[in-house]
Every structure is written in C-alpha cells, then in structure tokens.
Image (cartoon, rainbow, N blue to C red):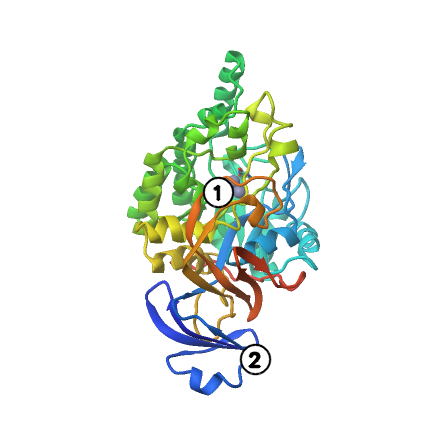
Amino acid sequence: MSLLIKSGLVVTSTGSYKSDVFVKDGKIAEVGNSLSAEYEKIAEEVVDASGKYVLPGAIDPHTHIDMPFMGTKSTDDFLTGTVAAACGGITSLIDFEVLGKGVTIKSAIEAKKLLAEGKAVIDYGFHPCITEVNDTILEEIKDAIEVYGTPSFKLFMTYSFRADDYTLIKVLEKAKECGGLVQLHAENHSMMQIMHERFEKQGKLEPYYHAMSRPNIVEEEAIQRAIYFAEFTDSQLYIVHLSSMEGLNRIVQARAKGLRVYSETCPQYLLLEDSCYKKPNWEGAKYVMSPPLRTSESNEALWKGIASGDIQTIGSDHCPFNFHGMKHMFGNGDYKKIPNGAPGIETTLMLMHSEGVVKGGISLEKMVEVTSTNVARMFGIKNKGEIAVGKDADIVVFDPKQKFTISCKKLHMNVDYNPYEGMEVTGMPYMVFSRGKKVAQWNNDCVEFVGKAGAGKFMKRMPFEAF
Ligand code: DUC
Ligand code: ZN
Ligand code: ZN
C-alpha cells in the first residue's frame, strides 16, 4: 500500500516547510521536495495538498468512551467515538478505565480492550484509573508500565471513587520508581461538599450552581496539594483538564522551582465561560462538566499557558451524554444529578486551529505540538506524533480555508447536542489517514467517514521520559 501526498505545507512542532510525503505500508517512508517525479506514477494514491497543511494526526489523551458514570453511560461506544475522532482529525486516543474495588489492572484493561476490539477505527490506548492502594495494585503498577503498555495512571480527588492523600502519595512514589506518569483530576472534594450543602439549604439547584459549587479555589487547592506530594516524592505529575488561572499559576510556580509538573487543558476551558450555565430551559445542563467552565480571565490565562509551554497538551475530555433523557431528565431539579461531561473529540482540532491559530493566540507549530507531538512524548507513543520518516502515517491533510458551521447534525458524535452549535470555524480536515489508510475526507459540506470498523489497534506505550 503506497500513498504520495504532494506539495503540502508539512507542519512540525519546530517549523513548517513545503514538501512531499511518501507513505509505504503504513509508515512515512520519505519526506522531501522532489518526490513527485519518482513516486507519482507508482503510488497507489496521490493526494494534491497544494494550499493545505500536512499535520501529524492529533492524539487525544483524554476520552471517556462507553463509560458507566453517574447512573448512566457515556453515549459513544468505540465505533461511534472513534469515527467521530477520525472525522475531526484525531488519529489515536487514550481512554480511561476506572478500576473497581479488588479488580486488577490487567483484568480492567482486558475488559476495556473487548469494548474496543472490532469497533475502533483508529489506534487506542488506556490509562488505568487507580481508586485504592494495596500490595497487589502497587506491585501491578510495575507490570502496567513495563508489560501491559499502560504507563500512565489517573487518580481522582473527587467522585465516589476518589483516592485519598495516602493513595495518591503511594502511587506517585511507585510511578516514579518504575517510570510511570500519574495524572490527576484535581478538585477538593470537601470544599465542594460544603458548597453543595449550602446551596441545598438555599434551594439553589439550577445548573449554574454546579459551577458556583466548584469555584476556582477548589481546583487551585487540589493542584497545590498534589504539587506538594510530587515534590515530597520527587515524582512527575500531570494535571488533567486544567480549567483555572489560579491552578495554572500554581503549576507555573512549581515548574519554575524545577518540579516535573505537566498539564493539559481542553478547548472548552479556552473558549467557553460560566455564563453558559445560565441558558434557559435547563440548557445550562449541557455544559455541566467537572471542573466547570470559568470566566474569560481563566480562558485568556490558559491560552498564554499554552503559548509559554507551561501547558503541554490538549485533551478533549470527551464524555458525551444526551441532553434529552440524560442531562435533562435525570438532572431536572438538581444540578448534582446531571451526568458530568460533554462531547468534544470531533471538534478539538478545528477549534484549536480556528480559535487559536487563525485568531493569533498560538502558532501553527504550537498547535501541532500540543495536539500531537507532546501527547506522543508525554504518554510514550514512540511511533506517532510527527511527520518524520519511520513514524506511523497518521496524517491529516488540513484545509486552512475551509469554513464549517458546527452543528451536531453534521458531526458524528453519538449525542443530541453540541456545546458550540452554530459557531463558524475556519479550517477543517480535508483527508485523514490512519497508518496510511484513508479514514475520513471532506465531502461537500462536512467530513465523511471512509474507514473500517475494527481497523484500530491497541497501542502498547513506553515508560515516561521527562522532557
Ligand atoms: N469530568 C467530567 O466532566 N466527565 C467525566 C469525568 C470528569 O472528570
Ligand atoms: Zn477528570
Ligand atoms: Zn475526564
């Protein structure tokens, strides 16, 4: 199988240059200026990328596909979720698996693999979510890193499956010893519990109070506490879905001290504000996610954090629930019962380009760095994340001029609304390749899926290396 992508602007995290790219047997075989003469006649497919960008496929490090949560289940399975990803220019993802009590990492990962096999259309990996420590789990962390290919672990500081400080410190220590990376959902559970009690007494139960019950300090305190633990254990730490300026400030201070503290944010924390919770007819529920949306002050700080390198990656935190029947019916009357999460996997790249690159907040190279190259480095995906010889041909030919009005009807996520409905973006995937095979292409007024169910493979990842 061979493919020639000619005359595009190849974008890497360090620079952009006009070039041809030749792909053979799923790998990037050559990148150079005059490949057309040699390969145009023999390549099985030739794509003219003049006027377009040739990007390494985005890698989403943060998804919740087919996940039981808050009395229901996220609505995308590994077919619909990865079809949507592919159509949005995401060519691999790492999903979470929350371990039940007494469950081994191995059995949790094997069970999750069964959900993905035969369905996923792009490559996937898993982060085990550790909810308790005991000798068995601590021993198994080593195998997860060295044998299972799952070297990153998530812990939650809130929800019923939250980890306490002892658990967190023990896992940080073990991860450091074996080359793992601990990811943290950082929110102080007790602070928000007290806010819930207060609002309950006052009868304040609308979606807006979801955000009010989790003010910025709830995230800031948890981040700072985790930073102390990272310092105490001399371990690396990764904060997921960073949402607040105050939390970012703590991370910046820690990094200035030389601590290995990394962070990820999501398009929703860069672009949306807590005024969304005030939408009438319970529509604010569409934005109920944790942490909650903040204000423009945090939005702007996070863009700057990306530009400065203090935030290294972008994840979607894709966790879709229908408005009708889920966010609406279950939640009506009490914000605490609204399933937390929103769809996002398909819109990450278009939003980062349109709202970041086109509006001038970040460079094109920075977009590639945070959506692909750094994600591959952070999570030990050695064969992806760059347009370079020998890497997997996970490639997005991106049309920077193509306009698209975001609408849930024109997207592929299995959910009945979109948080950005009606927003016009500039720049869309034109063709998307997963290991050299075309999986999606622009067709008239939207991107269509042209790949195959089950073509995605489990990615065995390598231990963490500091950068
Ligand atoms: N936050 C969400 O909004 N949804 C899934 C889990 C999480 O941490
Ligand atoms: Zn989380
Ligand atoms: Zn999440």
Mark 1 neighbour class, 10 Å CA radius: few under 14, some 14 to 19, many 20 or more = many
- Percent coordinates x, y for residue 57 in the rendering: 48, 62
Q: Please name whichever residue, 228 or 372, is drawn nearer the observer in this view of the structure.
A: 372
Identify the element where label 1 is drawn. Answer: strand
Q: Which residue is drawn at 55% across and 48% down?
A: 63
Of mark 2 and mark 1, the one earlier in the sequence is: 2
Residue where numbered disc 1 is placed: 184
Mark number displayed over residue 366? none
Residue 93 in sight from this viewpoint? no
Q: Residue at x 42, y 29 (%)?
A: 275
- The three-letter code of the residue at mark 2 reads Glu
Q: Which residue is drawn at 40% across and 55% down?
A: 370
Q: Please name whichever residue, 11 or 377, is drawn nearer the observer in this view of the structure.
A: 11
Q: Which residue is drawn at 35% across and 49% down?
A: 306
- The three-letter code of the residue at mark 1 reads Leu
In the displayed structure, 162 sits above or below 375; it is above
In the displayed structure, 270 sits above or below 456; it is above
- Percent coordinates x, y for residue 459 in the rendering: 58, 62
Mark number displayed over residue 44? 2
In the displayed structure, 144 sits above or below 396; it is above
Identify the element where label 2 is drawn. Answer: loop
- Percent coordinates x, y for residue 185 in the rendering: 49, 40
